[in-house]
Amino acid sequence: MRSQMKIAVCIPTFNQSKYLRIAVRSALEQSGVETEVWVSDDASTDETPMVMREFENDPRVRYHRHAKNQGIAANAGWVMEQPGTPYFVRLDSDDVLKPDYCRVLSEMLCRHPDSAVAHCAIEEIDEHGKHNHHRRLGRTSVEQTAEAALIGATSGYRVAANICMFRTSALRQLPYVYRPEMNFAEDWDLFVRLAVAGWNNVYCSDTLAEYRVWSDAGGYRSGRKASEIRGVLRLFEETLQPEWDRRDWETIDLWKARRRLAVTHAKTLAMIPPDTEDYQEVHGLLEDLAGNREVIESHLAFTKSTIGRFTESLAQPRRRLRAHAKSVYLRVGKIIPLVQRGFFRR
């Protein structure tokens, strides 16, 4: 009897005991393959150790708890370095794998030996597990070449969500999984570095996982946006720019991509109190990303003007409604005395 392929599922976690149990069970309940689950606890202060005690007698589950918090990239990188299986999955502890995820994506990587990453369409869920909608890429090809991946990566991380399967041998060729202390855009950077190394990627349009999106995901949290932009800057300066130079590609295209991303991120400035250090830091990082102060200033001026016009347009219907109400009130005010005097009696 032919033995099933073994796939590792790596779950970095920090203070997500509420969802961790669901993530681990989804990894254990994969169909058609044998799974081993690696959980790396980044010194959580919640009930994570208690949750993991439920799996202490399951030989398929390996749990490691760091004595000190390592940070997102270091914790995830550590656990992704542990498996010796041919393929492994990075699964965040609030996300969920559907039963066919490992079988389908491992079969795709088997059929495409030049690809190092497999990813898929996902179903977005909220913090309560309610299904919102599906995310799919507008992509017709199953396999994407390394060169196409490099060009596409200048506009963003081109996956439906960061739930990917990796070819272990491909990652072991890199000097590290994630750049040290790169806690934002680290997955995007890894995707690009694999393309730099000549690896393709494959995409499945089937919905094989659930990706949790928090209700405050679009909100402002102090320090977060600065860290995110700093990660994007490192991606461009330490990964993309050297590769563009090596290939002798037009650098102007890279700068155009940087400016588009800077303008996109500049929208966040409207949510940051302007007289704060955080505002100044984000503003400065956006200037570095764009390479041009005027780009950010003109966008801010445009945004303020747009918000002003939008506010004015909202005020117009209210003014018309108040004028109409006043007119009705005056008319009614004239009619009531007539009614009281019996003007409308026959």
Image: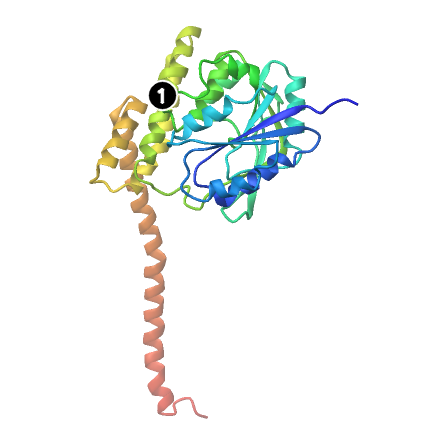
Determine whether 321 is above or below 148 in the image.
Answer: below
Seen at 73% across and 23% down, the residue is 3
Work out whether residue 59 or residue 246 is closer to the camera in this orientation and state it: 59
Q: Callout 1: few (<14), some (14-19), or many (20+) C-alpha neighbours within 10 Å?
A: some
Task: Looking at the picture, tell me which residue is in the foreground, 181 or 296.
Answer: 181
Can residue 109 be seen by looking at this rendering?
yes
Residue found at x 25% / y 36%: 278
Q: Quadrant of residue 199?
A: top right
Percent x, y of residue 1: 79, 23
Secondary element type, mark 1: helix
Viewer can see residue 295? no
Left or right of 63 in this view: 58? right
Looking at the image, residue 345 lies above or below residue 190: below
Q: Is residue 95 left or right of residue 265?
A: right
In the image, what residue type sits under mark 1? Arg
Q: Position of residue 145 (x, y in %)?
A: 56, 15
Colour pattern: rainbow
Q: Residue furthest right?
A: 1
Q: Total of numbered circles in the picture? A: 1
Q: Is residue 329 left or right of residue 153?
A: left
Q: Which residue is mark 1?
A: 234
Who's the residue at 25% across and 31% down the image?
Answer: 281
* Picture coordinates of residue 297, whole percent (x, y): 25, 31
Q: Quadrant of residue 176?
A: top left
